[in-house]
Image (cartoon, rainbow, N blue to C red):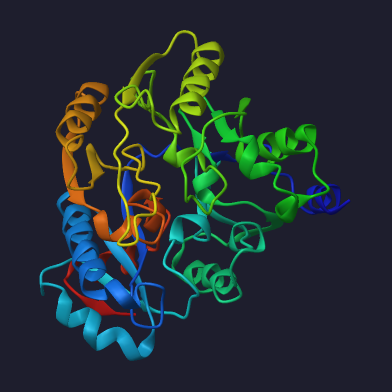
Amino acid sequence: MLLLTWYGLINMQNYTLLPEWAKQEAVILAWPHAGTDWAENLVNAQHTYVALINAVNRANAVVLLLCPQDEIDAATAALASNNQVLIVPSEYNDTWVRDYGFLTVSDNHKNYPISFTFNGWGQKFDATKDNQINSSLAKLCQQALIENPIVLEGGALEIDENQHLLSTASCLYNPKRNAYMTSDEYHTLFIECLGAKKVTIFNHGHLEGDDTDGHIDTLVRFTPLKAIVLQGADNRPHDPHFAELFKLQYEVSQALPTHKIYSLPLPLVLDDEGTRLPASYANYLIVNQHIIMPIYGQSEDENALVIIQSAHPNYTIVPVLCHSLVQQNGSLHCVTMQVPTNTIKPEIIAKAQLGVSIL
């Protein structure tokens, strides 16, 4: 009923979710601070964010950095004066902005921010503050925010330029997200709200320790050259993940038979207590002919870099050490949200390009 009621309010049929390789003007991040889950590993996490900000700026995009008012001085001190960063005073529950930051849809003339409800990955964590972020960010955008009450996370979606949208059953059908929604209703949501022309929902694949219930951005990614990058485990045939990731690869080959598949090696990353962490090389960010890619200080890093370069021959690959990020069960793509060109007001982008400043 909620879905149908919402459709009655606004016609979204002419709006299309843009693929990640659309030209970008900004990337949204949320600064890690002592009031977040990074408290025990804060220095390392902040160093990773600085490296990520540098990589985004080198890819000709500014950073919109969410930051609590009382942490602005510390964030400013950590950045170089020539970093192209606009600090946006904000309160948030966590820094995984991929899952609560607005997505961008286009009608081929204008870009619109669109937000969904974030409920802490199926009510696992408090997300009250996270859900208020887009109302603030909307003030920076050229067009009004489109709000949708359905629970949906950005990391659960992958789309290409042909509007083929990918997601995972383990995430979408979690009863603590949208218990009332059927497969057909999800397909309708993706078609009507995000412009999908084809929808594929995979039934296999997971990473131990992943709080998201199997987000697609840790498992399967489109490339601009009609290929697929997949988090595999061929290098670890006896790993507990092998069977599920093998089944996922078969699903992908059946759903996308004309796509070349690039299978990534699986790293083995543990926390200080020996617990397996959900490290994925597929959790990379595409920004303006650059692939900003997570590495983990593991023997598989070099091979993964070679595979990503092969899958994106026209892109510059920029590795960022993300061992600190995966300690909190996520990685590089999870902490970012890209913003396509002509979404943010020009004066906001211009201000960010002048150096580190505060909104």
Image location (x, y in percent) of residue 212: 54, 51
Occupied quadrant, residue 107: top right
Occupied quadrant, residue 176: bottom right
Q: Residue at x 37, y 88 (%)?
A: 69
As drawn, which residue projects farthest toward the bottom?
Answer: 70
As drawn, which residue projects farthest toward the top?
Answer: 258
Residue 76 in the image: above or below residue 220: below
Q: Nearer the viewer, residue 267 or 177?
A: 267
In this picture, residue 113 sits left or right of residue 89: right
Q: Nearer the viewer, residue 102 or 98?
A: 98
In this picture, residue 131 sits left or right of residue 210: right
Res 342 seen here: no
Q: Nearer the viewer, residue 186 or 169?
A: 169
Q: Residue at x 84, y 54 (%)?
A: 2
Image location (x, y in percent) of residue 342: 39, 51
In this picture, residue 162 sits left or right of residue 292: right
Q: Residue at x 17, y 27 (%)?
A: 306
Image location (x, y in percent) of residue 309: 19, 27
In this picture, residue 276 sits left or right of residue 92: left
Image location (x, y in percent) of residue 315: 20, 32
Q: Nearer the viewer, residue 286 or 61?
A: 286
Res 31 seen here: yes
Locate the C terminus by quadrant: bottom left
Residue 10 in the image: above or below residue 79: above
Marker count (numbered): 0
Residue 227 in the image: above or below residue 316: above
As drawn, which residue projects farthest toward the right?
Answer: 1
Occupied quadrant, residue 130: bottom right
